[in-house]
Image (spheres, rainbow, N blue to C red):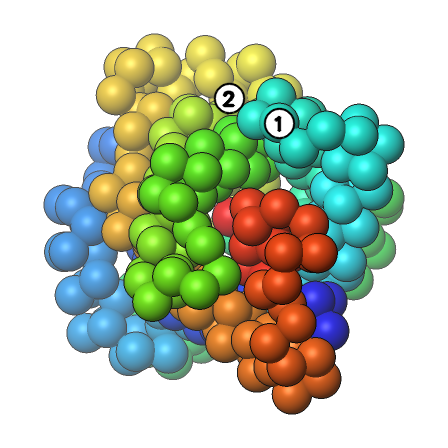
Amino acid sequence: MDFVAGCIGGAAGVLVGHPFDTVKVRLQVQSVDKPLYRGTFHCFQSIIRQESVLGLYKGIGSPMMGLTFINAIVFGVQGNTMRMLGQDTPTNQFLAGAAAGAIQCVICCPMELAKTRMQMQGTGEKKSSRKMYKNSLDCLVRIYNREGLWGVNRGMVTTLIRETPGFGFYFLSYDVLTRSLGCEPDDPYMIPKLLFAGGMAGIASWISTYPVDVIKSRFQADGVGGVNRYSSIADCVRQSVRREGYMVFTRGLTSTLLRAFPVNAATFATVTLILMYARGTEAGPTDCEPAQPSHHAQIQQQAQPSSL
């Protein structure tokens, strides 16, 4: 049931957060010489005006397709790692989260590559006259046919660098916040506290690894127009800093932070409500009896986050 709830909660998070992610990617990869957007809100307005509201949901098929596998990996690895480490401590939460983040990159990297390519397709056009990709799956198939397995995993190194500490900080922040807020199963404010903890954990995680995400987006979007500007990740960093200064690493940060809180709020609310209903009908009030594990462990089992 944890897995099912996590998948549904993650899907809710994707639906809420994908428009912000589209804006983030557009701002991260736009040309500094001829920028299309002046900022986050101008980007929102421009996409809706030029491409309709559906423009904000370009590439959503890719994260939806990869959601089940990513949740399975994250929940499985994080839970098994915590059991191997033995103690529920903040340090172990970080290590378990980092392990989960590293392993799920196998699915995350190709998924985000397709998402990024789809989000950049038909920029500024309501009805694109020439679509390179029909959908996310077609995008991956075409990349594979043209560039092989290496092309499908373009940006894997930057994804690993982002996801490993990112998930570590995510689980660490969530653990510290739920302990500090005193999330008890019988607390009438348990759900608002979990939503707040999850949202703030997401923000902390993104801030800790955001510069890497900028480079990842640029490297994965490179070649969309048929021309490759970057020969390597290091070259991408050098060119970006030389042309735009160190502020390039904050491109799209506003939309990312605006996205982080509601995405995790939607995920936590959905997961918590589903599990409370399921466990309430199956086991009744026994979930809160003293014989169960610690309150904090119960809260983590009931509302484990599904994705960043």
Residue 214 sits above or below residue 104 on the image: above
Image quarter of residue 18: bottom left
Please report contact status of discs 2 and 1: CB closer than 8 Å, yes or no: no
| Residue count near mark 1 (Cα–Cα under 10 Å), binned few <14, some 14–19, many ≥20 | some
Task: Report which residue position mark 2 lands on.
Answer: 236
Depth order, front residue of 101/56: 101
Q: Amino acid at mark 2?
A: Cys
Is residue 43 visible in this depiction of the protein? yes
Q: CA distance from mark 2 to mark 1?
A: 38 Å
Using residue 49 as the reference point, say whether residue 147 is left or right of it.
right
Depth order, front residue of 166/144: 166
- The image quadrant where one finds the N terminus is bottom right
Q: Amino acid at mark 1?
A: Thr
Rendering coords of residue 113 (x, y %)? 62, 49
Marked residue nearer the N-terminal end (2 or 1): 1
2 or 1: mark nearer the eye: 1
